[in-house]
Image (cartoon, grey):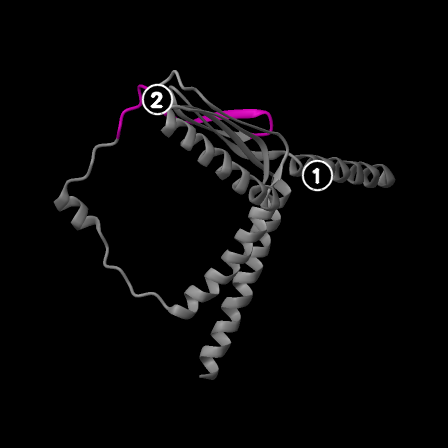
Amino acid sequence: MLWGCVITGWLIACIVFLALVLIGFVRVGILISYAQDGFRVRARLGRLFIMIYPPKPGKDKKPKKTKARAEKDREPEKAGDFERFRALIKPALDSFGTFISGLRVDILSIDYTVASDDAAKTAMLYGFSAAGVGGVLPLLERIFVIKSKNIRITADFNRTTPVILFDMAISIPIWRVFKIGTLFMFEFIKNHIRTKKQSKVV
């Protein structure tokens, strides 16, 4: 009976651990697209996508506060301590660098048709655009892992207005977000304790 309970406990622990590992590899991210109908922003959780912008119609907006009420609700600001700010900003910058390096660009798609009311201007804009992409894209590939890219720049001398279609999807696994958050809290607490000790010595 005792061995049965022990085996059951270990089995449950293994199942929970495996579930946490699988959840950790689920990717979260954001998808940004631009077309003729405007911007669209969607959040991603695994294979689930949630529309963020444009907002769904029909939601009542909260009434704006009047100037007198806003001044009444406003609390007096307190001067910040520089040492406390430094203890916060250092781990934040370190965590931000780790966060950026952990991002993956799943999709980078740009379809840009250069056009204007003058043929010479269209040709010049086309040359600038192609040169700009040629200079920026290698830099992005050094910073991010780009899984899929499709960049197309063309010139249309029959049009008078340019057209651009843009899609970008960025994601990061949940385990890396948890790791970055844990390291940030650890570094923040460590710097906070160090700052307190230095202030006591002074």
Residue at x 54% of width, y 38% of height: 134
Marks 1 and 2: which is nearer the front? 2
The verdict on residue 89 being magenta is no
- Residue 97, placed above or below residue 108: below
Going by the picture, which residue comes out furthest to the top? 158
Q: Position of residue 56 (x, y in %)?
A: 36, 21
Front residue of 63 and 135: 135
Q: Is residue 73 left or right of residue 88?
A: left
Dot 1 alpha-carbon crowd within 10 angstroms: few under 14, some 14 to 19, many 20 or more: few
Going by the picture, which residue comes out furthest to the left? 68
What's the residue type where badge 2 is placed?
Thr
Front residue of 20 and 166: 166
Q: Is residue 179 left or right of residue 167?
A: right
Residue 57 lies in quadrant? top left
Q: CA distance from mark 1 to mark 2?
A: 50 Å
Element type where label 2 sits in the image: loop
What's the residue type where badge 1 is placed?
Val
Q: Position of residue 24 (x, y in %)?
A: 65, 39
Element type where label 1 sits in the image: helix
Going by the picture, which residue comes out furthest to the front? 120
Q: Which residues are magenta?
A: 45-61
Residue 161's disc number: 2
Location of the N terminus (image quadrant): top right
